[in-house]
Image (spheres, grey):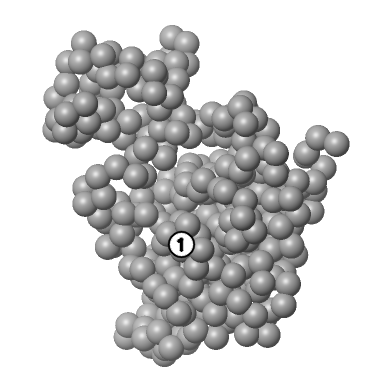
Amino acid sequence: MDERGKRKLLDILRVLNESERPLGGVRIAQALALAGREMSQRTIRYYLERTDAEGLTEPAGRRGRRLTMKGHRELQEAYAMDKVGFVAARVDALTYRMSFRLRQSKGDVVINLSSVEAGRVKEAARLMHQVFDAGLGMGQRLLLAPPGSRVGRSQIGPHEYGVATICSVTVNGVLLSEGIPTTNRFGGLLQMVDGKPVRFTQLIYYNGTTLDPLEIFIKGRMTSVGQAAATGQGVIGASFREIPAPSADKARRLSARMQKAGLGGVLLLGRPGQPLLEVPVSPGRVGLVVIGGLNPLAAVEEAGIATHNHAMGTLMPFEELASYQNIMDSLPA
């Protein structure tokens, strides 16, 4: 396929990725037109036949097509320069679309969607359990989906298990629902000594990356989450945000409530205008360190079990996620 054809195919995949439901040719054409990319329904049908054949999309009856896990991965890997700033924009979009309310502990939260090979899922589950036990996962809930099932809009492959973990962007949504806006600075690797955070050793700014930073660190085998969970010494994924200084006390109270609700997330909250873990903070702002939602999958990857991770994968009702302590119960004997 030539460059022009490849871009048309990717445009169609992006429309499906951004939709909460399957779409047919008419809806896809309308969405493309709104984005300034006109395409005839005949052309769209041609490319959908190609994406179906390649396993990037799948039919959903009369409702149209939806993206597969392979389709998500194709979008992640294609045309890096076209996606610079994509992560920062997606963080903002998902933050505003969250419906979770802390008081009721109900509503949609942002999740990361990952997969591990079915033959090693029990070993992976034990490793993830250890990370959550050590308090290095985002909250206390996740979802383990068997082969062939669906998580949100994504179809799990026949030889893999899907893993949905709470994404750190959920903290942004909770704060925003309480009137506290966040500024996303960077994702990074956080050194842990005796179980306490010491400093960031690596960082990637959100507005200059095409991928979630922790995805990059995981695939680069730059983390040591499993070691940190076992010994208190290691390097984990975390992110740095800023909030307005007048909201600091309210944010501390909300952090305690998030922890009690099983949502967790906030690792450290600084003081107005003061550096936090050696990171300078803007005047009139307070630094916030949020734990990485993909840390459990980082420990799995470190153990030599291949993972595919899609950070900020979709939205899912919080109440559909189960306690990590029951993770082994969801696996076949």
Residue 304, placed above or below residue 186: above
Residue 129 visible in the picture? yes
In the image, what residue type sits under mark 1?
A: Gly
Q: Which quadrant: the C terminus?
A: top right
Residue 187 spot, x, y in % from top left: 42, 67
Image-based side of 232 in relation to 62, left or right: right
Residue 200, placed above or below residue 170: below
Q: Nearer the viewer, residue 286 or 47?
A: 47
Instruction: Please give the count of numbered marks on the rendered protein.
Output: 1
Residue at 37%, 54% in the rendered image: 211
Residue 262, placed above or below residue 224: above
Residue at 70%, 44% in the rendered image: 120
Residue 65 spot, x, y in % from top left: 40, 19
Q: Nearer the viewer, residue 265 or 233?
A: 233
Residue 87 spot, x, y in % from top left: 34, 54
Residue 249 spot, x, y in % from top left: 53, 79
Question: Residue most toward the front?
Answer: 304
Q: Which residue lies under the disc numbered 1?
A: 220
Name the secondary structure under disc 1: loop
Pointer 1: residues within 10 angstroms few (<14), some, or many (20+)?
few
The quarter of the picture where residue 260 lies is bottom right
Q: Nearer the viewer, residue 78 or 249?
A: 78
Residue at 60%, 80% in the rendered image: 192
Q: Which quadrant: the N terminus?
A: top left
Residue 216, placed above or below residue 333: below
Residue at 32%, 82% in the rendered image: 282
The quarter of the picture where residue 272 lies is bottom left
Image-based side of 222 in relation to 46, left or right: right
